[in-house]
């Protein structure tokens, strides 16, 4: 037996390290270092007490209703998924056929190219400028271009494009534009209002980062209703389970918790960036819950390896034709202090 040739040929997406044994300080996968809202635990417990013998709501109505209030749209503008990766998969399956083209910036989220490879599609990477601005080649039309991904904030850089720039990009692209806002709750601006202004713009979000629910697996898309109607045909019948729907609904309902958590992460991000710069690192100004840095005098891979030996995990990333660097998630003040202390000793 053999799988499809494109599956056999691809290497597959490799997530960040998730050690299953021992105690590590994890600053490598951009998880929120703080527990989620207490309302989440209460909601999941109530769902458990209600029993799990029935199938969950296939469209997560309770979450759609509350998220619609938060973002100023109607519930039929919301599509829910098993994390935002599920949402990105649905969009790729819906828009891009075998042999057609998906466009993405580079360096950015590596999963985008994996989704194209699974589909048997092609992908085109448009290189960021050295200052992480996006060149106009990103909007050049091509006949078989069917979808474009634009992470904002971007990973690994934490940089953003202004909503005005994103709107201009969408207006000139010959295909839909997915604005991946996995980290947007940590940014000064976001693009959710653009969805109302241009039906080609769709915004994906996740509860993994800013709501502290990476282990729950819940994400969503904001798009115009005629598009959501089509995506509902593509998603798995029950792609969100009853516990994740209950927890996600409670999380997005607690906007006071979100703002308090955001303030803590941003304060630590600012302090961590300053400490890294004092140690000779070049740090890109970040709008996410991580920073991207290189060192002016030392190779960074040995730094990553030495930290790992001391049970501190950060992310070493090496991009072909671009270079390497370290992506360091914003942890608690204590976690960041431990990381900085080790770096000083090195």
Image (spheres, grey):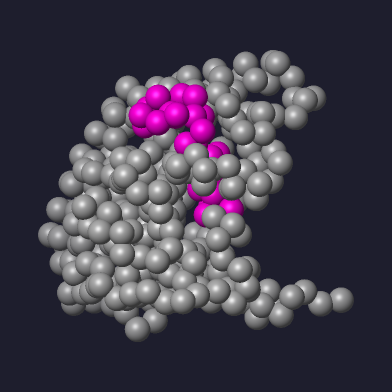
Q: In which quarter of the view is residue 276 placed? A: bottom left
What range of the chain is rendered magenta?
64-90
Q: Is residue 98 magenta?
A: no
Q: Main secondary structure of the magenta part?
A: helix
Q: Can you say whether 114 is above or below 72 in the image? A: below
Residue ID at (40%, 24%): 69
| Position in image of residue 228 (x %, y %) | 54, 43
Residue 245 in sight here: yes
Q: In which quarter of the view is residue 223 placed? A: top left
Residue ID at (32%, 44%): 197
Quadrant where the C terminus is found in the figure:
bottom left
Residue ID at (49%, 67%): 146
Q: Residue furthest right?
A: 1
Q: Can you say whether 146 is above or below 192 in the image? A: below
| Position in image of residue 224 (x %, y %) | 45, 42
Q: Give 279 or 161, whichever is nearer the viewer.
A: 161
| Position in image of residue 101 (x %, y %) | 50, 73
Residue 25 in sight here: no
Residue ID at (27%, 54%): 167
| Position in image of residue 295 (x %, y %) | 22, 71
Q: Is residue 236 left or right of residue 231?
A: right
Q: Give 327 or 40, whichever is nearer the viewer.
A: 40
Q: Can you say whether 83 is above or below 286 in the image? A: above
Quadrant where the N terminus is found in the figure:
bottom right
Q: Can you say whether 211 is above or below 46 in the image? A: below
Q: In which quarter of the view is residue 211 placed? A: top left
Q: Is residue 81 magenta?
A: yes
Q: Residue furthest bottom?
A: 321
How many numbered tags mark residues here?
A: 0
Q: Is residue 130 left or right of residue 4?
A: left
């Amino acid at each position: 037996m053999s799988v499809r040739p494109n599956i056999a040929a691809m290497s597959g997406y490799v997530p960040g390290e998730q050690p299953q044994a021992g105690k590590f300080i994890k600053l490598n996968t951009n998880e929120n270092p703080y527990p989620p809202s207490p309302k989440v635990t209460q909601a999941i417990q109530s769902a458990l007490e209600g029993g799990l013998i029935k199938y969950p709501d296939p469209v997560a109505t309770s979450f759609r209703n509350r998220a619609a209030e938060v973002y100023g749209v109607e519930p039929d503008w919301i599509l829910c998924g098993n994390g935002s990766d599920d949402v990105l998969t649905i969009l790729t399956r819906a828009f891009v056929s075998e042999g057609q083209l998906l466009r993405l910036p580079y360096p950015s989220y590596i999963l985008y190219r994996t989704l194209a490879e699974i589909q048997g599609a092609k992908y085109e990477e448009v290189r960021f400028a050295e200052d992480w601005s996006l060149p106009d080649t990103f909007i050049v039309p091509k006949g078989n271009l069917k979808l474009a991904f634009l992470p904002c904030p971007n990973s690994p850089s934490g940089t953003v494009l202004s909503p005005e720039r994103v709107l201009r990009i969408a207006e000139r692209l010959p295909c839909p534009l997915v604005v991946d806002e996995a980290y947007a709750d940590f940014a000064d601006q976001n693009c959710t209002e653009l969805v109302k202004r241009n039906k080609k713009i769709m915004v994906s979000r996740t509860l993994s980062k800013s709501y502290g629910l990476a282990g729950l697996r819940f994400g969503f898309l904001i798009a115009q209703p005629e598009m959501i109607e089509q995506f509902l045909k593509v998603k798995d019948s029950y792609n969100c389970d009853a516990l994740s729907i209950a927890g996600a609904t409670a999380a997005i309902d607690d906007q006071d918790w979100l703002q308090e958590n955001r303030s803590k992460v941003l304060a630590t991000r600012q302090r961590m960036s300053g400490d890294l710069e004092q140690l000779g690192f070049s740090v890109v100004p970040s709008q996410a819950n991580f920073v991207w840095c290189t060192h002016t005098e030392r190779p960074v891979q040995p730094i990553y390896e030495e930290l790992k030996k001391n049970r501190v995990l950060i992310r070493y990333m090496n991009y072909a034709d671009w270079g390497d660097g370290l992506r360091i998630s914003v942890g608690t003040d204590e976690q960041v202090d431990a990381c900085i202390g080790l770096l000083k000793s090195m």
